[in-house]
Image (cartoon, rainbow, N blue to C red):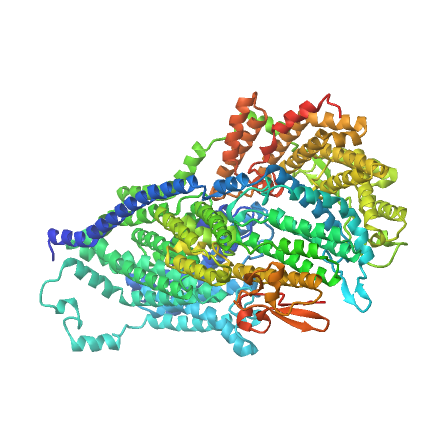
Amino acid sequence: MIGKRGWIGWLVLVATIPLLLLLAIVGWQAATQRKATAELSQLKEKLVAANIPIDNSTMQRRFEERTHPEGAKAWEEVTMLCDVLVRSAPKDLPILGEGSLPRKGASGIEWKEAAKVNDFIKEFTPLRKRIAQASSYPKPVWSSGIRFDGYATLLPMLQESRNIVSLLQLDTFDALYQKDNRRALEDLRGMRATIDAFDWDFCAVALMINVAKSETLYMTIHRSMEFDLWNEKELQELGEMLGQARNSETTWKELVLGEQAMIQEAVKDPGRQLQSGLESQSGPWVHRIFPLKASDQLALLKLTQTYLSAVPRASAAHLENAKIMEESWRVAASTGPTNLRLLQPLFMTSYSSLASAFNREEEQRRLLRCALAAKQFQLKKGRWPVSVSDLAEIGLTKEDWTSLAETPFAITPDMDGVTLSSPSQSNPAVRSLFLGYVIDSITLR
Amino acid sequence: MNPSIAWNRLCWKEFRQTLPLLGMLAVVGFLLQVLAQIASPGTREWNQSFFFLGVPGLFAAGVGALLVSQEKDARTLQWLASLPVSRNQIVRAKYTIGLIGLVSVWMISFAYFASMRIFFSQGSPWELEGFESEGGIAYWILHSLFVFTLSFATAWYFRSTLVGLIALVGITALVSLASPIISNVVMNQPPVFNLQRSPEAAVSISTLVGFTLVTFLLGWRYGIRSFSAASIPKRVAARSIASPTHRKGSIADRKRVQPLFSALVWQFSRQNQIAMMAIVVALVLATTLWRSGVELLLMVGAILGHCAICGLGVLTFQGDMIQNRIRFLADRGVSPHSVWLSRIFMPLSLLAAVILGYLALDWTIGNGDPRMLPQSFYVVTGALLLFATTQWFSQQVRSPVLAATLSPLIGLLSLFYCSFVHSELSFPFYSLVVVAVVPLLMSYLMTQRWMDGRFGWRYWAPQGLAVFLMVVVPLLPYFYLLATVPVMPRADREYLASIAPIGRRLVTHRISLMQSTQQTSGILMEGASNSPGGPGMSGEVEVVFVDPEPAASPVPGEESMQGHAEDGVGMEGMLASPVPVQVLALIKKYGATRWEDLPFSDQRKVQLEWIEWQINCIPLKIEGTIEPCPDVINHLKSEIIFSRLKLEDEPEWKEGIDRIGRSFRAMLEIAKRLRLHPTFRAQTEADLLDIWLLEQMEQSVTRKLLDEPLADEIIQHLNNSQARNKGRLQAIANQWTSSFLEEPMSTKSSNDLPVSIRFRKVSYQYWLMKEYLMAPNASARAVARERLAKEFRIHEFEFAKSVRTGSSFPGALWFGEWEERAKNLRGTTP
């Protein structure tokens, strides 16, 4: 048998020590969280003072400050009108439906849908004036009707802006078919203006849509050269319309800033954001049971801040840097607290796809720029350039005729014209820089 | 003795023995079925069928042990054998009374189930949700019969009651799994471990009949043999020869005096050795089956795990109740603290080990996915709660058989209650620890009385208090919320209820554009073209019943529809003949037979005429309103803008002026009708339309293009703030009352609140809207608006995004500066 003291000694060992340990852990956690809360609010205040968005309201304010209200209103009206036209358009039209684009045949340009397109486009004609008017406002614009709501923000206007580009593209082909250079050029200007007006760089989806619109413009300019209607001056304007290379640093920085605001918003109410972002319904449950602690929130904010300095500065580094950033976030999130892992799929998604799209966009821009310059060269000199360095006479620099793979484009004679080709045509390693279809050669006659 | 008297007395004795089990199962079964109904009112859930089927099964499992094992423990079986009744008669009496008891439990359980179904209008009691195996109820009746014969067989065979019960659970689980395997062999099919697609009825039933017969025969044989003189089992005899004084490896082998706690733990372990080993095996098996991902195995795993944890709870104190062993410790003055700790130590350690193993398995299978966490968390909490409740229960019941049979139900009841208060009443999950701590604390506090066998009012009163605490404490947060959540004042509630269109039927019309992608109706194409494709049908009429109870008297809408029909454009016509004829006429008017053949410019003209026809024909002839129609509104806007732009180039284009006027007229009619639609969405659409009309009227270019009477009418409409606010108030009243008819889809954390609290909160927010709308002055309105913008958290949030007001609440456009601008329009000339 054992005495009372022995029994109490056992109780102390089994119950009191763990209890004290538990109390110490709770106390230490409380102190840590208290300190982290203070630091987090200080950091947030500092960021807000520096106009860095950290939630819905600061993000909304940031966009509204940068938007011309009248311009936004004008574009909203244009978007609505184009949407009405596209919705009611006959389904056998090219671009808007299943019809085909004009193609070069034995007897010149052939287009069986020409009459139908012309009939439809007559109704669109008055709208071109409105687009030109809206283009005069500062860009980009942010619709006042959209409420910023983290990852759940609806962006219908962004999707609808593709209708403007589609209608202008159709009008361009109609104008080219009617040999109306002036109207075609005006339409292309409208396309450029639309791309710039909706250049919303706060999230990867918006940027992807923007790249798609740019590629539509490039494709239209490319196809327009088949009509052989452009004069030297117009070609010059088309070249300028292609614009400069995307400012990588600014674009990526704005993207990370936008996503930082969204992830911070998601942390505030993870259940709701996760419901729209993840297929699994158990995510919100985890957050209800184990909410993200102040120290974790602070660590997350500091982490996203570090990505601002890691953004790629050169076009060629898009893909590599994006992959590094994605991997870095994946590792940080998966080694962080459990509930941070749930947020992993929300942040920095599709960065490498986006980087690849940027590369594709830039490669096509450069190739097209060279093609326009080559045609200008031919009109000016009466002969085709022998090598890409001849394009210096048109005002191009070495960067313009060099592929993202640091190899110059090649010019080869092709019957009565020339073919301009990118190294990606023959080199799979270069092609891996761009996912998806890319124009890798342009034949000029 | 007269054989019939002996038989009657024997049966009476057996009947008295089954009564406690019968009574307690009737009470607990009723409670569980009622809770299942409360947890999911108005629905038919699997758990309702589960309790209906489960309770007879539990009786079947317990009755053998109750009638046989209990007599073995009390050593009354040999006494029975000494009476002038045959062994066959004794065994027969036990089987007969047990069977009558089983039939009674089935009848009681079915009576509960059927009355719940009838009371809650849930249809036929013969439909078993989640248990629609091909044998139906018959299969489960047969299954209970099998468990019944098995429980007798195990009770006759095993010396220990608890071991017998554990063996029963294991064999039943094995037989459940045997059906698919036998099906495989018999029918040459792969085994289907699925509840909905269990093996063919014939195979299932044949298997069960076979097992029932075998267990019955075995049970009978063991029963008869039990009355023979008992011989010492060989292993016991061998052990006695090897070590005559004590068992080898006993704690008594050690030379020094052992600490009390160690001795007590050793004693507990030795006396429950077999039972604990069986429970550990069952828990490991349950964990494996639970993670198998196969429906039937998962179900078997869950039941097995549940029974095993309950068994662990029962073992905590019931091991000492057998043959009143606890008296040995009580008589020697062993401290109740030591007894309690030593009894709880081993079961809790085993449970902790199994839980850790389960978590490790979960983590490995889930590949560390944190989304697996909630499930693991709930399983672990449930297991601890189950153990805490059943160990407490086992201390209060003096019969091990009753404790073992009823503990699964008691455990289920506690789990069910906790899950109910957590999910339905939003009791914080962490606070459920109270429910687990109370039974542990009670069993600790009552150990002394339990040891002494003092079960007077001083024992039962604290137990009653504990039950009260367990039931009431989880309800406190709910009642606190109920008392503190802001509510709509009664006067306002009555006012809104009085103006809500409840009790009236509201006729709404949907106007739409013709869509070339829609399929054309046969009537339209008759005589026009046989090819598919063409303009779509439009002008459908929707009748919205605001009140779920249709009005008894003829409603204005119906009368109007009849009048409409007499005009040749009746209700039927709108859905079939006249509308397509109208469309056809419009297409023909422009020289085509198919929509696709029309030039695009003419298609737009037809669209305008079609909209006008819908507006002029339907809403003006039938009292009613229209559904929000952004597509139509945008089309009319485009008509106006395109025509105006074209007129800038061709000022003499008379058709353009005409189209602008007609479009404005159509928009004005839509704006007026939208105001009558008592929903926030329609009101917001109407606000946006009014703002657009206002902006147009402010442009002198547009004003000049309009007829003076039409312009005046539009200005008058824009200035009619009384009609506007009436529409808004109707919308508040209607949406508020509707929110009680259909559960609001909350988007914020209010979703976690109990329904009654949510309704109060929702009502409060509608009240804020009403206060905002009816504020006496601008400053009061500004305050109300600020509160509204901050606090409005109900489903209209989503629509607000879709109609692009840029705000989170439906009243964002109310009393905007545009309403002031509209007032200034009056008297201005272009």
Residue projecting furthest to the left: B256
Pick whichever, B128 or B605, lies toward us: B605
Residue B490 visible within the image: yes
Quarter of the view holding residue B400? bottom left
Is residue B93 in sight in this rendering?
Answer: no
Q: Where residue A403 sits: x, y (%)?
A: 56, 65
Residue B489 sits above or below residue B530 on the image: above
Q: Is residue B510 above or below residue B228?
A: above
Foreground pick, B20 / A373: A373
Quadrant in the picture for the C terminus of chain A: bottom right
Question: Is residue A88 left or right of A424 when viewed as pictured?
Answer: right
Q: Nearer the viewer, residue A156 or B17?
A: A156
Residue at 73% from the left image edge and 21% from the top image edge: B827
Residue B595 percent coordinates (x, y):
83, 52
Which residue appears at 74% of the width and 60% of the height? A98
**In which quadrant will I find the N terminus of chain A?**
bottom left
Q: What percent of the width, then of the height, locates residue B672?
A: 72, 32
Q: Position of residue A104 (x, y in %)?
A: 77, 66
Q: How many marks?
A: 0
Q: In front: B389, or B825? A: B825
